[in-house]
Image (cartoon, grey):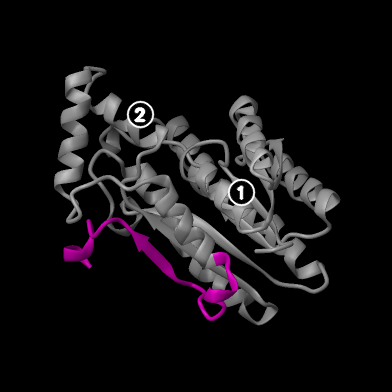
Amino acid sequence: MDGKVALITGGSSGIGRATAIAFAKAGAKVIIAARTAERGEATVRQIEDAGGVARFIACDVSRAEDVERVVAQTVEAYGRLDCAFNNAATIDGAFKMLADFSEEEYDRALANNLKSVWLCMRHEIRQMLDQSPGGGAIVNTSSLNGLGGAAQAALYSAAKAGVLALTKSAAQEYATAGIRVNALVAGAFRTPMLEGVWHTAAGGDPDGVKAVEERYASMIPMRRIGTPEEAAAAALWLCSDDASYVTGHSLIVDGGWSAALR
């Protein structure tokens, strides 16, 4: 990644934060795009303290003008865009039966978890087509829920399934332009987002949260929750030259959770 420019959305927390740090360690110049400035700036300081190059740009990836601005500022700062990890997401679209969601909840879930990825890809691809030399690598974060749906997570699952379709479509459309597009299909990783899911599922009871975590781990053949760094390693590889012949791929990183179902 020496000298390459990488844009990481949702880069202030969880998998995004770990990926930003991993890209910087590998020599990339990193742009961290996220809503929360305090956590984003803290990640930048950690990268810089370790000798890396990074900057934070506040961004709501469900807003077209924010995404356009982030890509423009990335190019203004570093001259081009080589890699993008579209990882920002929310838990909108879960914890209800399908028929109980409102139209507003549907719109919010799809905006934050699917439209946001499309907006990022649209502006990232345009930049990768226009720059010289052209090309680049894009990785979009999906979820096991997007492979087959999940009870009480219909809208979230639909959005994550849509991410896979966007990924595979773009991979075919832009392969001859030197743009590779792949998906990271994430299982259970110890992130603030997943811990929030456990907390909600347990009704806020600390003992209940531990029980939910243990139930998750029991369904995974490796019998543990993944670390954000393990997801980051997969995203880094997909963007690297070692994956130069990989595009349109859904890389499932889940400790074997879905192995018996696919």
- Residue 6: quarter of image: bottom right
Q: Check if mark 2's residue and mark 1's residue have beta carbons within 8 Å.
A: no
User: Residue farthest to the top?
Assistant: 205
The image quadrant of residue 252 is bottom left
Is residue 44 shown in magenta? no
Indicate yes or no whether the magenta region holds residue 250: yes
31 or 124: nearer the viewer: 31
| Drawn side of residue 108 relative to residue 24, left or right | left
Of labels 2 and 1, earlier in sequence is 1
Q: Which residue shows up at 81% across the image and 68% down it?
A: 130
Residue drawn at x 23%, y 60% as measured from the top left: 256
- Residue under pointer 1: 8
Give the residues in magenta: 239-262
Residue type, mark 2 in image:
Gly
Q: In this view, does 253 lie to the left or right of 36?
A: left
- Where disc 1 sits, the SS reads strand
Secondary structure under badge 2?
A: helix
Query: In terms of image quadrants, where is residue 97?
Result: top left
> Is residue 118 at all visible to an observer of this figure?
no
Residue 49, how many percent across, how many down?
Answer: 66, 38
Quadrant location, the C terminus: bottom left
Residue under label 2, please give it: 196
Residue 199 x %, y %:
29, 25
244 w.r.t. 208: above or below: below
